Amino acid sequence: DLKEGNGFDILEQVNYKNFDVVFTTSYTEFAVLAFEFSALHYLLKPITKEKTDIAIKRFKEKNSIPIQNEQITNLKTLLNNKNRKILISTGKGLELFDIDDIIRCEADGNYSNIYFRNKKHILVCKTLQTLESSLADFNFFRINRKYLINIECIVSYNRGKYPTIKLIDGFETTITEHNKHKFREILENHIAKVL
């Protein structure tokens, strides 16, 4: 994102399109697959030398194909709408989930448990920090070291020396001192009115 618009806005304004593009992005795996589907290269942040070398190798190996306006439109729609979907690697392979169905994520060492509205939960080989980064644009908040919660799933917030929140599945946890002011601000901005 730039002051004048995003990378897609720039591509739409360029008349000469006989070039390849390497996108840099911090979007989720689903967005990355969208890039691959549209035959464009990408670098997923954080960018490393190894990832850059792979992108350059792909560029050298492929013939230069003009960027199609349809590709740009499709990618822009996918990313702007965010699709509210996420691809998660499970024991069975890759599964597509609605982000809105996630209630909370719980740290478990280098793994995380993801809990859903349908009472299902899965263990994924991702740290809570990785999930926090992937879900940053979808109203998720790191309430404490162990839990990342969906703001949409909060049913109550109890103030006090050790404030707590309760989620729609009955789960309760405390808010760290460090996070409570930021949480209160996010909560007030997210809901229509605080009486």
Image: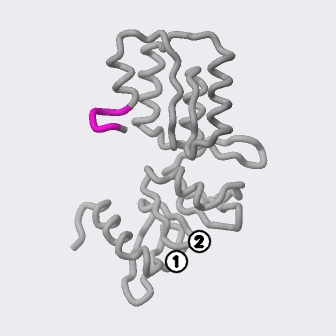
Pinpoint residue 145: horizontal percent, then vertical percent: 56, 72
Say which of 126 and 20 sits in front.
20
Q: Is residue 151 left or right of residue 115?
A: left
Say which of 93 and 63 sits in front.
63
Instruction: Name the residue that disc number 1 marks.
Output: 173
User: Tag 2: residue type?
Assistant: Lys
Pinpoint residue 38: horizontal percent, then vertical percent: 55, 22
Which of marks 1 and 2 precedes in the sequence?
2
Identify the element where label 1 is drawn.
strand
Pinpoint residue 159: horizontal percent, then vertical percent: 37, 83
Residue range highlighted in magenta: 2-6
Q: Please tell me how crowded label 1 is: few (under 14), some (14-19), or many (20+) other residues with Cα within 10 Å.
A: some
- Image point 43% across, 11% down: which residue? 17
Identify the element where label 2 is drawn.
loop
Task: State which quadrant residue 187 falls in.
Answer: bottom left
Query: Do the residues bearing badges 2 and 1 touch, measured as CB atoms within 8 Å?
Result: yes
Instruction: Name the residue that disc number 2 marks.
Output: 146
Residue 163, placed above or below residue 39: below
Q: Please tell me how crowded label 2 is: few (under 14), some (14-19), or many (20+) other residues with Cα within 10 Å.
A: some
**Is-magenta flag for residue 75?**
no
